[in-house]
Amino acid sequence: MFLLGMMELIISGILELMSDDLGISVAVTGQLITVYAVSFAIFGPVLVKLTEKYKPKPVILISLIVFIFGNVIFGLSETFLMLALGRVMTAMAAAIFIVKILDMTVVLSEPSIRGKMIALVYMGFSAANVFGIPIGTLVGTLFGWRIIFLLVIVLSILVGFGLILLVPDKESESKESPTKTKIMNMRNVVLYIGVTMSVLIGNYIVLGYISPLMTSNGFTIENVSIALFIAGAGGMAGTVLGGNLVDRFGSRRTIITMMILFSLTMLAMPLLYSTPILFYVNLFIWSLFQWSTSPAVQAGLVDNVEGSAASVFSWNMSGLNLGIGIGAVIGGIFISRFDISFAPWLSFFIILFGLTFAILVKEDKTLYN
């Protein structure tokens, strides 16, 4: 989850480095985020369906091999087309890997602590913000952006050996886990996915272009690494916070509260560029509130499904990546036509749509007695 999270999010940290090296505009380079996101969204549900009859271990290992080759292509690319091909391959691999991990987490978790367990596993993804992206950005600044992908390949090979040696080759630890899926409330599922898309669109209008946003307001590229580290720390804390809140208060209430607070940090951001300390503090709590919605949405999806949650997890991850892709497109258009400094205010209005979706969810209160 850490490696996949790093590969999905790293572009935002090295956007200007890649743009300068390859002679491609920042707005166009930013669309590599969209390429990954749309590929994940399109191929994810299809690949999950095609591999559902097979044991998870060989599927995950094959996915990891595809992931490695995708990074080789990306790291050696000289053109946007080759970069895009590498992103498509890594997205396809991640689409299977993440869904199978989340589904197994549900199978192996007691309902009373399911939110915490989903948060624990998902923390690998948010940890990529804390360690992977800022360290990757710093390494790219010092040694060139291609070195990052060499390091990812080495780490992926080590993970592969770990999977071969340590992961049991069987369906799951629970022989009683149901294999069929029955969606109990499709309306709620659609609304939760709508929440995911709104949060990620709003988030990536800003995060996808955090580097030019900061440098255009007096920060240095080194400050971007610091900002990404702070945002990542907020993301890890938010993942834990969201997991604990959902077990105590339920998905709907957790999401509504966190999204209100998330939207307020978006409103405040453009007012804080001239005060770096306050900007960094706001960035931390912005990420805290945003990431806290993720385990709440995942738990909410599980509550509306009987049997395997793999399909709805796949749909939600597709929604997540579509949100990232749409956010990157909107952000690219915005910075081409308007002052990037005010992008967070655009995000505020988009997040309001997600808040509306959350309010419309009808939650079964008996689940949280």
Image (cartoon, rainbow, N blue to C red):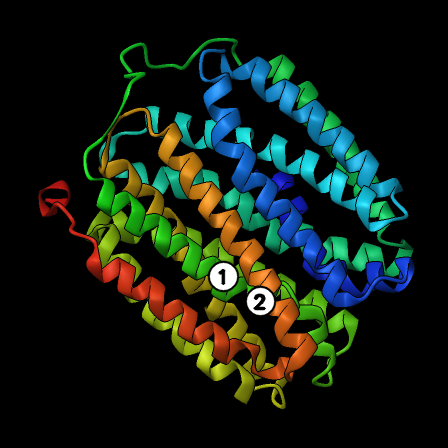
Indicate which disc residue 330 carries: 2
Quick one: 126 or 181, which is closer to the camera?
A: 181
Residue 318: % across, % down: 48, 42
For the question of whether residue 5 can be seen, the reply is no
Q: Quadrant of the C terminus?
A: top left
Q: CA distance from mark 2 to mark 1?
A: 8 Å
C-beta proximity under 8 Å, tags 2 and 1: yes
Image position of 213 (left or right of 18): left
Q: Residue at x 59, y 47 (%)?
A: 37
The amino acid at mark 2 is Ile
Indicate which disc residue 339 carries: none
Q: Tell me: residue 218, above or below residue 255.
A: below
Residue 124: % across, % down: 54, 42
Circle 1 sits on which residue?
Answer: 201
Q: Residue at x 75, y 30 (%)?
A: 68
Quick one: 11 or 186, which is closer to the camera?
A: 186
Q: Residue at x 57, y 40 (%)?
A: 40
Q: Residue at x 33, y 24 (%)?
A: 107
